[in-house]
Amino acid sequence: MADEQQKERRTAFITAGTKGIGLAIAQAFAREGYHLALTSRTPIEDEKFTQGDFKDSKVMLIALELQNEKNIGGALQTAVESLGPIDVLVNNAGTILRKPIIDVTWSEWDEVMNANLKGAYFLSAQFAKHCFENGRSGSIVNIASTHGIAAMADRSVYGISKGAVIQMTKTMAIEWAEKGIRVNAIAPGTVLSESRSEVFGKPASREKMLARIPSGKFITVEEVADAACYLASERAGSVTGHTLALDGGLLSQ
């Protein structure tokens, strides 16, 4: 019986899944009973991935720079060889750039687009091929941003990249619907995370950001993780091509 239950467990591939939003998503998927392949820019040996929420899951840590298709395909294949077929892909990896338009360089444009859009596009393509070749359905969850929907000064390249992620989500959803692959996105507003501690730690900056949010509260990494679990699950079986905004009412103004 234990062996049968083990075979039935699903597997998720999560980019940048070892910290911040990605780690919260990984923890949530582990609680849902998934095995996990988590990527990071550098190799990570951390015992926390064998304890707590992860103690009953197989967790594979993969060093991955989302710069070329060969690396992407190799990482996905490595995960498949160790964990079996991949059921869910979460494109979480990305970077932000805060800079006026006239000061943005060509190399900065390329860096943001490669990290936020190009890598997710080609990793999704490799995941779709994997599903097609194995006759399996699948689910992709892209982490976008409210900046991809509503413009903001000094966020041009980041906002453009995330807007493209939302359009990519729609296009992939339509193209792969008949193949049983659902593609959705999450557009978080201001997320309270350790990576932004330098901003949240300043009372003036914190109050300024909160004043823009009708609910008067920041988004938590756990809320993003819960949304990712829902969109990846059979509970959202009829949901595809959708972008779920977690914004505390920000976009309704």
Image (spheres, helix red, strand yellow):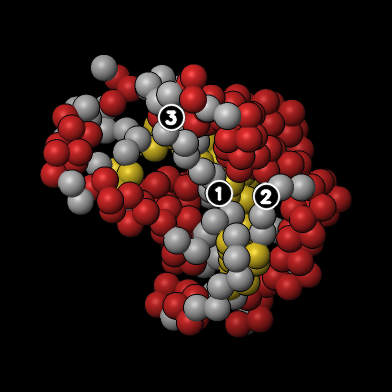
Q: Earlier in the sequence, mark 2 or mark 1?
A: 2
**Which numbered mark, 2 or 3, is in the foreground of this view?**
3
Helix, strand or loop at mark 1: loop
Q: Residue at x 37, y 22 (%)?
A: 152
- Res. 83 image quadrant: bottom right
Residues at circles 2 and 1 in contact by the CB criterion of under 8 Å = yes
Q: Is residue 94 visible?
A: yes
Please name the residue that numbered disc 3 is placed on.
99
Helix, strand or loop at mark 3: loop
Which residue sits furthest right?
A: 133
The foreground one among 18 and 109 is: 109
- Res. 215 image quadrant: top left
Q: CA distance from mark 2 to mark 3?
A: 23 Å
The foreground one among 196 and 1 is: 196
Residue 46 percent location from the top left of the image: 50, 78
Residue 131 percent location from the top left of the image: 77, 49
Q: Quadrant of the C terminus?
A: top left
Please name the residue that numbered disc 1 is placed on.
93
Q: CA distance from mark 1 to mark 3?
A: 20 Å
Q: Residue at x 74, y 42 (%)?
A: 122
3 left or right of 48? right
Above or below 6: residue 226: above
The foreground one among 193 and 10 is: 193
Residue 139 percent location from the top left of the image: 63, 45
Instruction: Tell me how many marks there are.
Output: 3
**Amino acid tagged 2:** Leu
Q: Residues within 10 Å of mark 3 (few under 14, many from 20)?
A: some
Above or below 159: residue 246: below
Q: Residue at x 60, y 82 (%)?
A: 2
Which numbered disc covers residue 66?
A: 2
